[in-house]
Image (tube, rainbow, N blue to C red):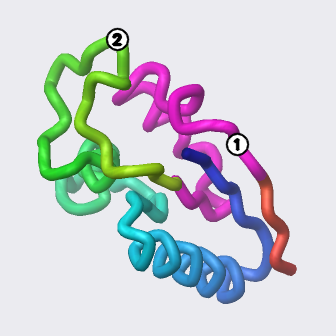
Amino acid sequence: MAIVIISGPPDQVQETAQALRSAQINRRRGVMIVLKPNPKNKGAHDVRHQIEKLLAGDPLPEDPPKDLKTLNWKPNPMVLVPAALEGVLSDFEEALPGFTKFFGPVSKMDVG
């Protein structure tokens, strides 16, 4: 498991994130590219919905367990974060306490 913060020119950040995403999917591993949540729209970019992309078919419980290992995660998931959205990790932490520690370590990659 890992959280990778990717910095550089936006087009290169996006290309790198998509390449890493494809590699994870080809290995049948979990992966998520963090998107900016829209608090007015509880749709696809909602933090809870994004976290559910890492779960193996289960919804995120309204009251998540303290031990995140008990949730049914996809194998060896990776969280890809464009540097411009690094602050959004606090929203993930609020929705699922322990998120950063559980999915860490946090690594930084500069593609510029």
What predominant SS class does the magenta segment belong to? helix
For this rendering, which residue is in front, 63 or 36? 63
Residue furthest to the front in view is 27
Residue depicted at x 69% and y 56%: 5
Percent coordinates x, y for residue 50 in the rendering:
32, 53
- How many other residues sit within 10 Å of disc 1, few (<14), some (14-19) or many (≥20)? some
For this rendering, which residue is in front, 6 or 9? 6
- How many other residues sit within 10 Å of disc 2, few (<14), some (14-19) or many (≥20)? few
Q: Quadrant of the N terminus?
A: top right
Residue depicted at x 34% and y 11%: 66
The dot on residue 66 is: 2
Q: Is residue 98 magenta?
A: yes
Q: Quadrant of the C terminus?
A: bottom right
Give the distance between the C-alpha atoms of the residues marked 1 and 2, in whole angstroms: 21 Å
Stretch in magenta? 79-107
Q: Which residue is mark 1?
A: 106
The dot on residue 51 is: none
Left or right: 85 with respect to 46?
Answer: right
Percent coordinates x, y for residue 77 in the rendering:
45, 52
Q: Which quadrant of the structure image shows residue 65?
A: top left
Q: Secondary structure at mark 2?
A: loop
- Asked if 61 appears above or below 50 in the picture, the reply is above
Q: Amino acid at mark 1?
A: Val
Tally of numbered tags: 2
